């Protein structure tokens, strides 16, 4: 009788997973601009063996708080969904990124925490994803966003990450990004902290500067979560460089990537990504910054293969 009554209650109200029931961790998921037709997820997976990717970006649309790829492509667009299904059949999975360098952010156009949580649910349901990444390169209403993320994490055990701007190699993430993390802590959102190791002021060797910035972020994380051990904080740290030529002049070479990889492995951090799969080729060596090539001499998928050793 008790079991029957319990079953009825569960059917009526649904099963809400506790925040501790997190999705299985994805430790390496390079970013791919899913609005571009090539390369495809299965294509890269077959060529490299890498089967986890971060899909960029789910944005608001002309209808406002209605997520679409790049703000224009339907979430259920067969070209995208069929790639995800094929990748999952190969044993892979995806992280869904919102935000980015260009708007409109869902985090802006969804006017309340409940509306934003609804948009996140729609993204996760359409893709079957269990990981969401909020890439913050503009101001967002931090408390509203973290309320929405807390709801989703409480309901589904969704893994949540913040990809954040770095201010300097000795400073870490910028002041607003730090406020976002402080808000996440207040709202009990369990987050991966993923600094963008790109486009910040530095001196000396660029590979060393990326590592220095990551270490500075760890020090900031200690102020946000003072009760966590150093090992626990490192497990909640990600790093995401921009391969090849960066927007503001620095260049991430293969040697820099290996140096960062070795540091990440020796410190047992939680995640590596990079921007982006579509740039991981040497078709424009010696050229400028491009969304479709790295601008340096390299082999096809060279950075994808370097970082997969993580």
Image (cartoon, rainbow, N blue to C red):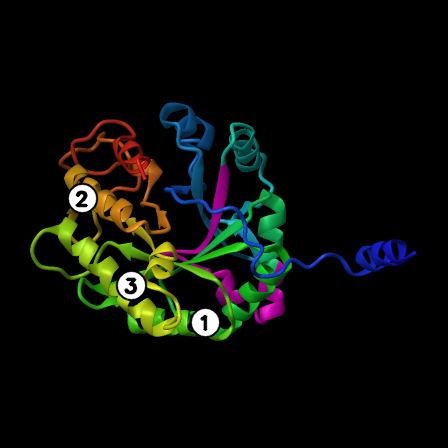
**Looking at the rendering, in which quadrant would you find the N terminus?**
bottom right
Q: Position of residue 62 (x, y in %)?
A: 55, 57
How far is the residue under mark 3 from the one under mark 1?
15 Å
Q: Horizontal placement of 284 versus 55: left or right? A: left
- The answer to if 108 sits in the magenta stretch is yes
Distance from disc 2 to disc 1, alpha carbons, whole Å, reads: 31 Å
Mark 2 neighbour class, 10 Å CA radius: few under 14, some 14 to 19, many 20 or more: some
Can the viewer see residue 64? Answer: no
Asked if residue 272 is positioned above or below residue 283 in the image, the reply reads below
The quadrant holding residue 116 is bottom right
What segment carries the magenta color? Answer: 93-118
Residue 259, numbered circle: 2
Q: Nearer the viewer, residue 84 or 249?
A: 84
Residue sticking out furthest to the right: 1
Looking at the image, residue 26 sits to the left or right of residue 238; the answer is right
Which label's residue is closer to the chain start, 2 or 1?
1
Residue under numbered circle 3: 218
Residue in view at x 65 percent, y 57 percent: 17
- Residue at image point 34% right, 58% down: 231
The mark found on residue 185 in the picture is 1
Asked whether the viewer can see residue 178, the reply is yes
At 22% from the left and 27% from the top, the residue drawn is 299
Looking at the rendered structure, the secondary structure element under dot 3 is: helix
């Amino acid at each position: 009788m008790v079991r029957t009554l319990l079953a009825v209650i569960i059917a009526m109200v649904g099963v809400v997973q506790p925040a501790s029931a997190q999705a299985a961790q994805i430790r390496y998921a390079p970013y791919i601009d899913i609005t571009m037709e090539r390369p495809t997820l299965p294509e890269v997976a077959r060529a490299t063996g890498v089967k986890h990717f971060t899909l960029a970006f789910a944005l608001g649309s002309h209808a406002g708080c209605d997520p679409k790829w790049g703000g224009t492509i339907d979430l259920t667009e067969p070209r995208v969904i069929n790639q995800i299904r094929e990748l999952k059949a190969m044993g892979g999975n995806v992280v869904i990124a919102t935000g980015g360098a260009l708007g409109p952010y869902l985090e802006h156009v969804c006017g309340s925490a409940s509306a934003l949580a609804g948009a996140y649910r729609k993204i996760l349901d359409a893709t079957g994803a269990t990981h969401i990444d909020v890439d913050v390169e503009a101001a967002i209403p931090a408390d509203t966003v973290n309320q929405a993320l807390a709801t989703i994490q409480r309901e589904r055990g969704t893994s949540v990450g913040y990809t954040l701007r770095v201010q300097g190699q000795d400073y870490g993430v910028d002041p607003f990004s730090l406020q976002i993390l402080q808000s996440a802590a207040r709202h009990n959102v369990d987050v991966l902290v993923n600094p963008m190791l790109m486009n910040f002021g530095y001196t000396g060797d660029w590979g060393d500067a990326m590592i220095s910035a990551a270490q500075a972020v760890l020090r900031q994380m200690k102020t946000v979560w003072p009760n966590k051990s150093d090992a626990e904080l490192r497990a909640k740290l990600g790093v995401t460089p921009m391969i090849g030529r960066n927007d503001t002049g620095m260049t991430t070479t293969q040697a820099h990537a290996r140096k960062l990889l070795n540091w990440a492995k020796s410190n047992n951090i939680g995640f590596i990504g990079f921007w982006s799969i579509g740039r991981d080729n040497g078709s424009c060596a010696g050229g400028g910054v491009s969304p479709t090539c790295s601008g340096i001499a390299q082999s096809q998928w060279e950075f994808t293969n370097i970082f997969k050793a993580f």
